[in-house]
Image (tube, grey):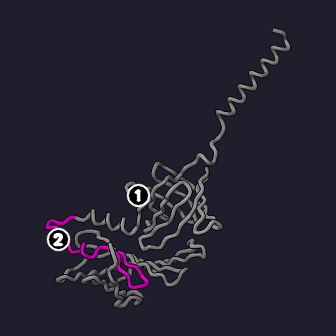
Amino acid sequence: MAPKAAAKAETTTAKKAAKETKTETTEPRDADFKWFTTGVYKVSVDGSELDTYYVFSDKQNGRVDTVSGIGIGFTYEQNRNGVIFHMGCNDDTTILTITDASMNTFSGTMYGYNYTFTRVQDADPASFVASAYVNAKAAEAQTCDDGQNPVMNFIGNFTNGRAMMSVSAKGKDQVVVTVSWGSSAFETTKWIMSGTVTQVGDTLVMNYQDCDCESFFFNEDGTMSQSVAEYTNGCGSITFSGNQAVWDDFEQGIADGQVFSYTCN
């Protein structure tokens, strides 16, 4: 082979090798990153579990669903750094920066808080309703030797017209109650309490001393702007009878004799 032809062949071979090497070391595209897949994820913020679920309907759309019934739709995009949510409308941009990831759990920062998303394995995003799912799980967990657990008669949701009370069983004679009260479109206050119930005939009375109260504030686009802890370890009582729950709050007196009526489970 002539020297000029040999040199040209060597140059061609070198370029081909360089091209192959470059192809092998090319970083994945943003489109290749799929943190979330179609499904339902439970949310924790700064280590505390919320009654909030992110429901991913497909590769672009989803919704936030809460036990209290407060929710908002979103579209989303995924990249190597995390997820960009467009909450409520396409003009909003909420960024989740992923800091840690495993097969079914993702952690990251959003709104200045540390969020953890854990996949709910047995939840169908097409039919998922947070309140129904939580209450169904509570019912499955209950056992009673005689099969007549009185607590189960009051599992479900109650409302007074503006506030929603969600009741779930913690044991044969214990319940957990969450009350969400929207004072406006931009503010919701939540109480979480639990206690042992005492049965008198067909009436159950729960006295509690561990109530945590927190207020949540929202922007016009539905995104949360901040949360404020109102108090902890508050006390009071809830009386369950028939299809009603009567709430007496001893901490602030906001619910003295407030009557909630059963809606569904």
- Could you tell me which residue is drawn at 51 percent across and 64 percent down? 63
Establish if 114 lies above or below 151.
above
Q: Determine if the magenta segment contains residue 232.
A: no
Q: Could you tell whether 9 is left or right of 123 in the image?
A: right
The reply to whether callout 2 and callout 1 are in contact (CB within 8 Å) is: no
- Could you tell me which residue is drawn at 85 percent across and 14 percent down? 4
Establish if 176 lies above or below 86.
below
Residue 258 lies in what quarter of the image? Answer: bottom left
Considering depth in this image, is 63 or 230 the residue closer to the camera? 63
Can you identify the residue that label 1 sits on? Answer: 124
- Could you tell me which residue is drawn at 63 percent across and 48 percent down? 30
Number of dots carrying numbers = 2
- Which quarter shows the N terminus? top right
The residues bearing labels 2 and 1 have C-alpha atoms spaced at a distance of 30 Å
> Dot 2: what SS?
loop
Residue 234 lies in what quarter of the image? Answer: bottom left
Q: Could you tell whether 65 is left or right of 159 in the image?
A: right
Residue type pointed to by label 2: Gln
Q: Which mark is residue 148?
A: 2
> Dot 1: what SS?
loop
Q: Determine if the magenta segment contains residue 156.
A: yes
Read off the magenta span.
Answer: 143-167
Closer to the N terminus: mark 2 or mark 1? 1
Residue type pointed to by label 1: Asp
